[in-house]
Amino acid sequence: MVVAAGVLGAGALLAAQGGGRGGVQVKPGEPCPPGTTEVRPGRCSAPEFPPPSIVDYRPRTTLVVAEHPVPKAKFPVIDSHNHTTVNASNIDQLVRQMDELNLRVLVNLSGGSNPDAVKQKVDFIRASQYPDRFRVFANVAWNGAGGPGWAEKAVADLEQSVRNGAIGLKIAKDLGMFAKKADGSRVDDPVLKPVWDLCARLNVPVIIHTAEPQEFFSPHDYRNERWLELALFRDRRHFGPGEPTFEELVGERDRMYAANPKTRYIGAHFDWYGNNLARAGKQLDRLPNLVLEVGAVLYDFGRQPRAAREFFVKYQDRILFGKDSYQATEFPYYWRVFETADEYFDYYRDYHAFWKLYGMDLPDVVLKKLYYQNALRVTPGLPQSGWPR
């Protein structure tokens, strides 16, 4: 492997220079040379043996702490961010799994931009044995935005999709990153205002995924905490020439929130501010038309449990539960982080987060709002009856 060869080369070089296990001296604040680590203040040394690669190093912990796995959520849950199409082949299995998890409603955000496709999904759910267990959001086709007739067609299709049973609009990350205007330039918010205005008029929320985690836009070096994920997935690297930066994308999105105060927005993935809760708090303070959703950023809350708990308590009316990818075995990790005070337990995907998680031990009043009460308020098209007080 290239990494191992580079590390061995550095160690051999140090040995040849007379460092060996004794190491080399560095100045205060200076990093250790590649292939070495600090063994004493100002002194770096290479390991005697070949180090494992990042994918092979899986240390077992000797820490003995209380463990409280949570296979079933304490209160019923609305998953406001999922991408599972429900059909005759999977609906019974899905409902069985959802019952085991205490997941009462699953919202499919991939309804499509064709009103007929939305109607087909909604009609199937309504005719099933489980009409109150699933809901659908519609989408908009962004390519060609700003061209002749685009706004009229986008608005007409979305309005028809809502008539056909969609209860909201999902905006995918292609808006801003890949979708283009008719003239080939990037889409910006004034062109899209008719869509936002329609959602305000119809009283349906807009859940928007803008950008990606901040490190996806940073150099792919050994200081990048998402190095392994970026090495595994080529399409998650967004630091190439000509690509928008993280700050450009979130800046455009946040200005769009402010420019459309009558439209209700749900910031998917915590708006990628889960690693910067102070910034998330300032955003919520500034934008009363915005709530945040927790899908796929559990690793950020679980590594700062005290600060995250304080944030969730302070902004308890502004956070929704969402998971993004439907994997039944992964939901209990969310329940455990939110409901327990457990310490030092694994996240479910090593390439997302190599660090351990800690429980936030949220109060019941906050859990209820996170799991279902806030979603019922933000998204009126959800089933409104039968929930615990």
Image (cartoon, helix red, strand yellow):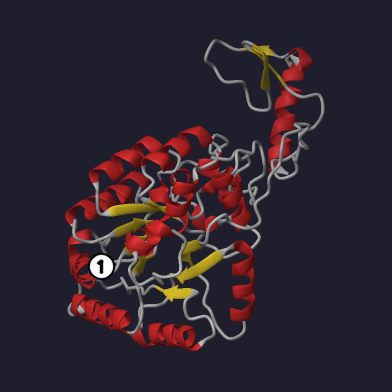
The residue lying at 64 percent from left, 65 percent from top is: 100
Instruction: Classify 143 as above or below 9.
Output: below
Q: Amino acid at mark 1?
A: Lys
- Say left or right for 313 vs 185: right
Q: Which residue is situated farthest in the right direction here?
A: 49
Viewer-closest of 339 and 48: 339
> Percent from the top left, x then y, of residue 8?
75, 31
Q: Which residue is mark 1?
A: 181
Viewer-closest of 166 and 51: 166
Rendered image quadrant of residue 283 = top left
The residue lying at 34 percent from left, 51 percent from top is: 244
- Say left or right for 40 vs 215: right
Rendered image quadrant of residue 142 = bottom left
Is residue 202 visible in this depiction of the protein? yes
The residue lying at 57 percent from left, 65 percent from top is: 326
> Percent from the top left, x then y, of residue 12?
76, 24
